[in-house]
Amino acid sequence: MHSITRVGLLCLASAHGIDAQSLAQRVTSSDGIVHVIYPSRPTACGDGQTFINNLFGRSTYYSGNSTFTGHGSWSTRPCVHGPARVMVTVMIGEVTRLRSFVGPLPTESVRGITASAAEATAWLGDLALRATPKVASEAMLPLILADAPDPWPLLLRVARDDTRPLSVRRSALNWLSTGVNEHLGIADEGGDTEDDEMRKQAVFALTQRPKSESVPELIELARSAKRPAARRSAIFWLGQSGDMRAVEVFTELLASRR
């Protein structure tokens, strides 16, 4: 029997007879590893094992907690569109780790659960809002991967929640900066000129100054810089700053028209 067919049958077997259960209940029904498989953004592709690419329609590679751009061994490998898959570690009925993939399903038989994009985003969104800091942060990439409405309102909610650990709020800000650039249509397409590169370096140099000086200037550039490269860079570094003043700026920019 073909390996992908085996995976598919196992997924169907996992779902059979427990449709009334929530996805969260199905995931944590027994300890061990379970793979949750759901539709991914049309642009996203990957090798199903090590990297995800084109999440926002551009060449940025995600692997675990690392992000890569440019050329490398990952850029020469086949990149297959969909589905998204989250490998979930469950211990004592609790999710303890998530790892995200896009592309071909495993060749070996695995415990799998098929889910709709809506089911996956509801489950992952709840993890982002309530899970341990590690799991909440790991839930954000697979949440963004889903072929569903953009999760920026939920991530804004996470970033605003002062009852959540700072590490989780900062993770939300990091992803929100990417979402803002996508919304504004100034995502990095790799065509920057030498002048653009100089502008980006100038913005980076700004980040080396004390936050009391750098953050207000990053906010101003994020709101009104005329050059896309400078504005894009300011939005990125504002997200990286971890400064909660970025939340209202991102809220404002996400509500604006392109």
Image: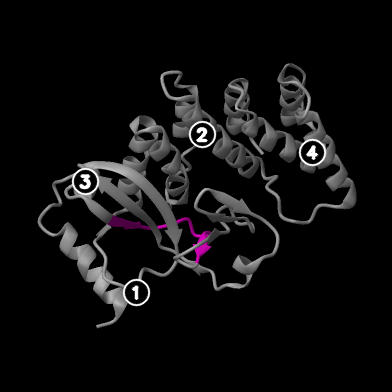
Q: Is residue 163 left or right of residue 205?
A: left
- Please state the horizontal and vertical placement of residue 233, each as a whole percent of the image: 74, 39
Which is more foreground, mark 3 or mark 4?
3
Q: Is 75 displayed left or right of 10 in the figure?
A: right
As helix, strand or loop, the secondary structure at mark 3 comes to: loop
Q: Which mark is residue 230?
A: 4
Asked if the magenta segment contains residue 65, the reply would be no
Q: What residue span does the magenta drawing correspond to? A: 34-46
| Among numbered discs 3 and 2, the one appearing first in the sequence | 3
Instruction: Return the residue at label 2.
Output: 172
Q: Are marks 2 and 1 in contact (CB under 8 Å)?
A: no
Q: Nearer the viewer, mark 2 or mark 1?
A: 1
Kindly report the distance in space between the C-alpha atoms of the residues bearing marks 3 and 2: 25 Å
Q: Which residue is mark 3?
A: 28
* Residue appearing at x 55%, y 54% in the figure: 62
Query: Tag 1: residue type?
Result: Thr
Quadrant occupied by the C terminus? top right
